[in-house]
Image (cartoon, grey):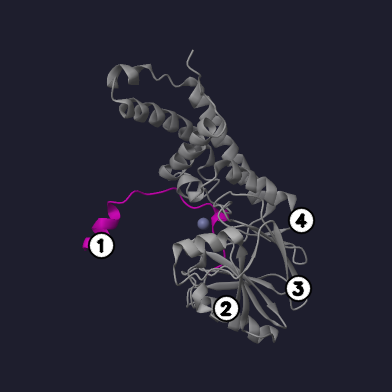
Amino acid sequence: MSDSVDTLALPDYAPLPESALGPAVNEQGYYVGRVERNLFWVTDSVYVAAFLATPDGVVLFDAPPTLGHNLQRAIDEIAETEGTPNTVTHLVYSHHHADHAGAASLFPGATLIGHAETRRLLLRDDDPTRPAPEVTFTDGYTLEVGGERVELVFRGPNHTQDNIFIHFPDHDALMLIDIVNPGWVPIFNSNLSEDMPGYIAAAGQALEFSWTHLIAGHLGRLGTRADVELHQAYIADVVAASQAALASVDPTKYFGKYGQNAWGWVNGYLTEITTTATRPVVEKYTGVLAAADIEPLTYTTTFMLMQSLRLDKGLGSQVHP
Ligand SMILES: [Zn+2]
């Protein structure tokens, strides 16, 4: 059949490490589990959201559209077993991205809470599935609902201009989206992040909070502090390999070949640096982090971090005599 012929033509990848996968989803395509006490997490194996089931109502943290109506199904399931209300009274945005927020409009009665920059970006984007938050903050905000306390903390731009740390001090948990993918390498371009120094720093900032359980937004399981440390090691290796390649790759042949075609030699030179830096990282992390062997992921992450070394840190920048 044409389907099997098409599939056979596609590349094979390394087997997923055991650490890549979480619990199986149910027939409706979701899994809901307890993080601690009345804090729950819900996943479709690619996206993760969370909610607090309080006597005064449900506080939902993110509304990924891939989970969509399964969010309310998961909430209903827990409300029934816990004997708590199933109405979402509050929805907290981790950041403005549609892939984590695009089901927000399914909860029209909820008070929307987010960073002031999230409000600005959502007003700019004007997407009816993601109404702008009416309760906003700049540095931090303590959310108290149903006797529970959640700290929303902004530490500067990282993945986006508005991505926040959501700390659950009484649930031993931290929610930080799109920085660390527990058990997996970042997706393209350092998880499609905007601010590389902020992206690198965010993992260390996460470890400054007190927690055992990490709700990281992606793939099918919760994270641990060891997952954050492994992510830091991977990023540190990408940065070190990029520094080494910036110092060792000789651009002379590209100048010689392309002359006045400036973008011709820039392409040759930067491609060689990125390829040189990517290779040892792919080799080291294949079998350790899932999808490390899918080279374009580490290649594009390396390209972003290498450009940040040049443009943010000034590495290799020379002043004309
Ligand atoms: Zn995002």
Q: Amino acid at mark 2?
A: Ala
Image coords of residue 301 (percent x, y): 48, 42
Disc 3 residue type (three-letter): Glu
Q: Are marks 4 and 3 in contact (CB under 8 Å)?
A: no
Determine the secondary structure under disc 1: helix
Residue located beneath label 1 in the image: 3
Q: Which circle marks residue 60 in the picture?
A: none
Q: Position of residue 41 (x, y in %)?
A: 62, 69
Q: Is residue 120 above or below residue 194?
A: below
Badge 2 or badge 1: first in the primary sequence: 1
Give the distance between the C-alpha atoms of the residues marked 3 and 1, in whole angstroms: 51 Å
The residue singled out by tag 2 in the image is 74
Disc 3 target residue: 148
The image shows residue 272, relative to residue 24, as above or below, that is: above
Mark nearer the N terminus (4 vs 2) = 2
Pointers 4 and 1 in contact (CB under 8 A)?
A: no
Label 3 crowd (10 A; few <14 / some 14-19 / many >=20): some
Cα gap from disc 4 to disc 3, whole angstroms = 17 Å
Question: Foreground mark, 4 or 3?
Answer: 3
121 relative to 241, above or below: below
Residue 254 seen in this snapshot: yes
